[in-house]
Amino acid sequence: MEDAYAAAAKKYFRTKEDLGARFDRDSGALDVFARKKVVDDVTNPDLEITPVDAESMSLPASDEGIVEIMKPREELLQLGRIAPRRRSRSSSRKSGRRSATTSTRSMRAGSAK
C-alpha cells in the first residue's frame, strides 16, 4: 500500500525525486517524503542535497547518508483518491489471474479422476 501512495505522490507532485511513503497504522497518518543522498557536490538536485542544506533543514542522515524530506500533509489529501484506485486495479488483475489458475487446476484435477 505504501508503494502505491509513493507512486501516486510522484505523479501528483510531477517530480523525479525518489519518493517514499510510510503509513502509521496506529494513528492512520500518511507521510510522504523525498529521499536524498547527502553529498558535497550536488549534480542532481532531485536526488542529492549538500550537508549544509540538510543541516539547515534539521534533517538527520541515515547510516547510508540518506535524508528524508517530508512533503506537506495538506498537499497529500489528494492522494487518498488516487492511490487506492491504482491499488484496486492491480488487485483485480492479480485476483483474475488467480481465479484462472484455480480454474485450470480444477479442470486438470477433474480430468484425472
Image (cartoon, rainbow, N blue to C red):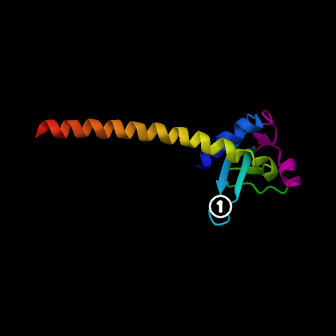
Is residue 44 at all visible to an observer of this figure? yes
- Please determine whether, in this image, residue 64 is positioned above or below residue 111: below
In this rendered view, identify the residue nearer to me: 51 or 108.
108
Q: How many marks?
A: 1
In this rendered view, identify the residue nearer to me: 57 or 72.
72
Q: Which residue is mark 1?
A: 24
On the image, which quarter does residue 88 sit in? top right
Quarter the C terminus occupies: top left
Q: Residue furthest bottom?
A: 26
Is residue 66 at all visible to an observer of this figure? no
From the top left corner, tell me how far across and down residue 68 is, in percent. 74, 51
Q: Amino acid at mark 1?
A: Asp
Q: Is residue 105 left or right of residue 17?
A: left
Q: Is residue 67 left or right of residue 89?
A: right
Tell me if residue 50 is in the magenta stretch. yes
In this rendered view, identify the residue nearer to me: 102 or 25.
102
From the top left corner, tell me how far across and down residue 100 is, in percent. 34, 36
From the top left corner, tell me how far across and down residue 75 is, in percent. 80, 47
Question: At numbered mark 1, what does the secondary structure look like: helix, strand or loop?
Answer: loop
Q: Residue at x 78, y 33 (%)?
A: 44
Tell me if residue 109 is in the magenta stretch. no
From the top left corner, tell me how far across and down residue 112 is, in percent. 12, 38
Q: Is residue 106 left or right of residue 28?
A: left
Q: Residue at x 77, y 38 (%)?
A: 13
Q: Residues within 10 Å of mark 1 (few under 14, many from 20)?
A: few
Magenta residues?
38-57
Q: Residue at x 30, y 41 (%)?
A: 102
